[in-house]
Amino acid sequence: MSSETNTLLHRDELQGKRYPLYFERAVLILAFVAMFFLHPVVISMVDGTLGMLVAWCGLPLFLLLCAEMIGRLVQSMQKG
């Protein structure tokens, strides 16, 4: 083993903390559960075709966006 760095920019890299992947998976499962319970509420709030579109497309995208933002927040807290 040589002491030379073998990165592309020849820099020293340190091993970081282990990322809590189980937390991000739990948030994703919670987003699916929220979709199951919020779907009828959204359909009853918005009538017609727009309600179906919001319930089947908008709500899942919004919940996945929230899960992703929570995962990125956890990741940024892990770096610092």
Image (cartoon, rainbow, N blue to C red):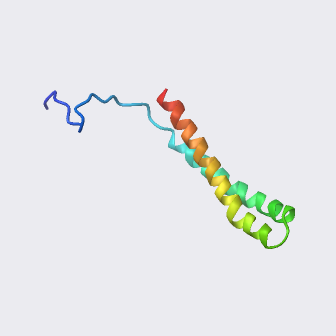
| Residue farthest bottom in this picture | 49
The quadrant of the rendering that contains the N terminus is: top left
Numbered label tally: 0
Q: Is residue 13 left or right of residue 38?
A: left
In terms of depth relative to the viewer, which is nearer, 40 or 22? 40
Q: Left or right? Give the position of 39 relative to 18.
A: right
Residue 17 coordinates in the image, percent (x, y): 43, 31
Q: In the rendering, at what x and y percent does residue 27 appear?
A: 62, 47
* Residue that extends furthest to the left in the rendered view of this protein: 2
Instruction: Place residue 45 in its image quadrant.
Output: bottom right
Q: Nearer the viewer, residue 16 or 55?
A: 55
Which x, y percent locates residue 48?
83, 72
x and y, in percent, of residue 30 in the image: 66, 51
Q: In percent of the image, x 54 and y 44: which residue is there?
A: 22
The residue under the point 73% across, 60% down is 36
**Which of these two is toward me, 26 or 7?**
7
Closer-to-camera residue (23/50): 50
Q: Examine the image and state in which quarter residue 77 appears.
A: top right
In the picture, measured across the screen, residue 42 lies left or right of residue 13, that is: right
Q: Is residue 28 above or below residue 19?
A: below
Q: Residue at x 16, y 27 (%)?
A: 3
Identified at 31% across, 30% down, the residue is 13
